[in-house]
């Protein structure tokens, strides 16, 4: 009788051991799936966070807008002084669309590296803008707006702009916050240089 009880206990212990090992295997597989999923989600969250930071944190600061070489109270050549806002990532000028809107006309501009902003008598090609570095930042790179750079951007309006006329200039980078300046030209323009903004 004692022998029969001993053999039954051994069979029960073996079954319990098999169930226990099966539970450990299932838990290990579940843990592996959870760890893998967590790693994937973490990578996606990091890349999304970086993209969002670049999109929200990167912006251009338009410091000043003025016009030059006006004749008969009209101007055509505009200069925009700009720099990066604090915490912004570098911006490539070929990735920036600039638009100028007037009451009955508008034009889109793209970066042209051959335009020389130091030569004010130069005829600027329609639809293009050029740049000149007034101050080079520590990480200055040609064709980019980087931290510490102060850049003079030159363009020509789609037509002559007269006194008191409304003007909207928009700068739309590929990544970052668009910058819009809306202002009216002065009521009286008699100087060679006409300050428009701020």
Image (tube, helix red, strand yellow):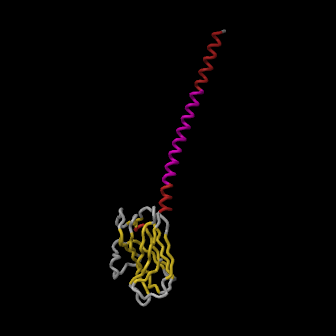
Residue 36 among those drawn in magenta: yes
75 over 50 or under it: above or below: below
Q: Quadrant of the N terminus?
A: top right
The front one of 175 and 192 is 192
Q: How many marks?
A: 0
Image-based side of 68 in relation to 164, left or right? left
Residue 104 among those drawn in magenta: no
Give the residue displayed 56% in from the left and 28% down from the top.
21
The answer to which image quadrant residue 191 occupies is bottom left
First to last magenta residue range = 19-47
57 over 128 or under it: above or below: above
The front one of 44 and 194 is 194
60 over 192 or under it: above or below: above
Q: Position of residue 136 (x, y in %)?
A: 35, 67
Q: Position of residue 173 (x, y in %)?
A: 46, 67
Helix, strand or loop for the magenta stretch, by majority: helix
The front one of 141 and 34 is 141
Question: Residue farthest to the bottom?
Answer: 72
The front one of 198 and 9 is 198
Q: Position of residue 160 (x, y in %)?
A: 44, 85
Give the residue displayed 35% in from the left and 62% down from the top.
138
Give the residue displayed 65% in from the left and 13% down from the top.
5
């Amino acid at each position: 009788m004692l022998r029969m009880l001993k053999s039954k206990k051994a069979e029960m212990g073996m079954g319990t051991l098999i169930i226990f090992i099966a539970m450990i295997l299932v838990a290990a597989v579940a843990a592996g799936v959870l760890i893998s999923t967590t790693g994937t989600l973490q990578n996606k969250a990091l890349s999304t966070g970086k993209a969002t930071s670049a999109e929200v944190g990167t912006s251009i600061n338009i410091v000043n807008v003025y016009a030059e070489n006006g004749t008969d109270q009209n101007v055509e050549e505009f200069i925009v002084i700009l720099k990066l806002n604090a915490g912004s990532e570098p911006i490539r000028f070929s990735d920036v669309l600039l638009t100028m809107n007037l009451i009955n006309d508008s034009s889109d501009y793209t970066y042209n590296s051959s335009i020389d902003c130091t030569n004010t008598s130069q005829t600027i090609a329609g639809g293009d803008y050029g740049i000149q570095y007034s101050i080079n930042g520590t990480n200055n790179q040609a064709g980019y707006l980087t931290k510490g750079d102060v850049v003079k951007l030159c363009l020509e309006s789609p037509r002559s702009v007269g006194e008191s006329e409304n003007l909207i200039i928009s700068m739309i980078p590929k990544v970052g916050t668009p910058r819009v300046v809306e202002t009216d030209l002065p009521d009286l323009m008699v100087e060679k240089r006409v300050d428009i903004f701020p």
